[in-house]
């Protein structure tokens, strides 16, 4: 480690090669070994747990979208308590037990001194190394949330999860000129697409979204 440090400054030299050559020369196992070695060096210089009270998730190839979501969910205390309270049976193979692996991952985030791996959780999803590629976090969250609710046996726990993330949208068509008003079917959602614009807080963005939209339609 000392050869990388000079006058309390960390110096890392990068060498860029053609992507095709990197893929041919380095397999998945070698990539993981390299990332772990770099992580060990950096951890010996900077300890995130001591400095911030938190550790993060290791980015195994293109899992940043999943890591950001999992860490967001972990930092919601009420959600974390629900996950911890779910009773698990030892009869289910750990490799395919999604809920148990979420509990273990959250526990590691809470107690580990180093960055944590999502590999066991991804294995419980049925993913292999060939299934790791960039996904849409919105789509992943919807699928992940539905899977969590599906695994819960307690109706109370299901209701608690739904109360945290799900909400109802009631679209209404109004034509004042013809004294016409019609409520469309209620849509249950778990995410909002908000326009930031010049807004500085989320409530203002929600208010903008829920305001009336006028359409000038031909008669």
Image (tube, helix red, strand yellow):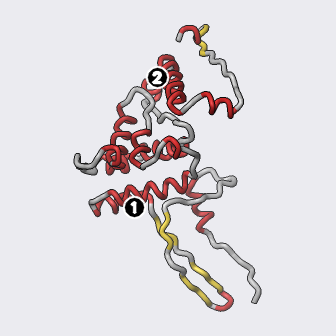
Residue 95 as seen in the image, left or right of residue 192: left
Residue 29 position (above or below residue 218): above
Task: Give the percent coordinates (x, y) of residue 182.
Answer: 56, 85
Q: Residue at x 53, y 56 (%)?
A: 139
Residue 121 as seen in the image, left or right of residue 204: left
Task: Pick out the residue farthest to the bottom.
Answer: 178
Task: Give the percent coordinates (x, y) of residue 201.
Answer: 59, 52
Dot 2: within a 10 Å radius of its alpha carbon, few (fewer than 14), some, or many (20 or more) residues?
some
Give the structural element (helix, strand or loop) at label 1.
Answer: helix
Residue at which label 1 appears: 162
Tell me, for residue 47, which label it has, or none. Answer: 2
Task: Give the percent coordinates (x, y) of residue 141.
Answer: 49, 54
Q: CA distance from mark 2 to mark 1?
A: 36 Å
Q: Residue at x 53, y 22 (%)?
A: 38
Residue 22 as seen in the image, left or right of residue 30: right
Q: Of marks 2 and 1, which one's residue comes earlier in the chain?
A: 2
What is the quadrant of residue 181 in the picture?
bottom right
Tell me, for residue 21, which label it has, or none. Answer: none
Closer to the camera, 118 or 33? 33
């Amino acid at each position: 480690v000392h050869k990388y440090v000079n006058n309390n400054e960390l110096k890392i030299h990068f060498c860029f090669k053609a992507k095709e050559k990197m893929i041919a020369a380095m397999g998945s196992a070698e990539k993981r070994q390299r990332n772990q070695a770099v992580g060990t060096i950096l951890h010996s210089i900077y300890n995130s747990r001591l400095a911030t009270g938190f550790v993060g998730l290791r980015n195994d190839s293109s899992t940043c979208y999943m890591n950001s979501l999992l860490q967001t969910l972990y930092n919601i205390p009420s959600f974390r308590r629900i996950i911890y309270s779910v009773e698990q049976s030892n009869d289910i193979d750990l490799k395919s037990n999604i809920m148990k692996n979420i509990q273990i991952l959250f526990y590691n985030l809470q107690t580990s001194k180093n960055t944590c791996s999502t590999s066991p959780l991804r294995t419980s999803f049925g993913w292999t190394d060939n299934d790791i590629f960039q996904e849409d976090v919105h789509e992943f969250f919807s699928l992940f949330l539905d899977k969590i609710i599906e695994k819960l046996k307690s109706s109370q726990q299901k209701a608690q999860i739904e109360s945290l993330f799900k909400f109802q949208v009631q679209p209404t068509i109004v034509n004042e000129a013809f004294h016409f008003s019609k409520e469309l079917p209620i849509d249950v959602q778990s995410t909002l697409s908000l326009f930031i614009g010049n807004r500085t807080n989320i409530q203002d963005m929600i208010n903008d979204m829920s305001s009336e939209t006028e359409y000038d339609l031909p008669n």
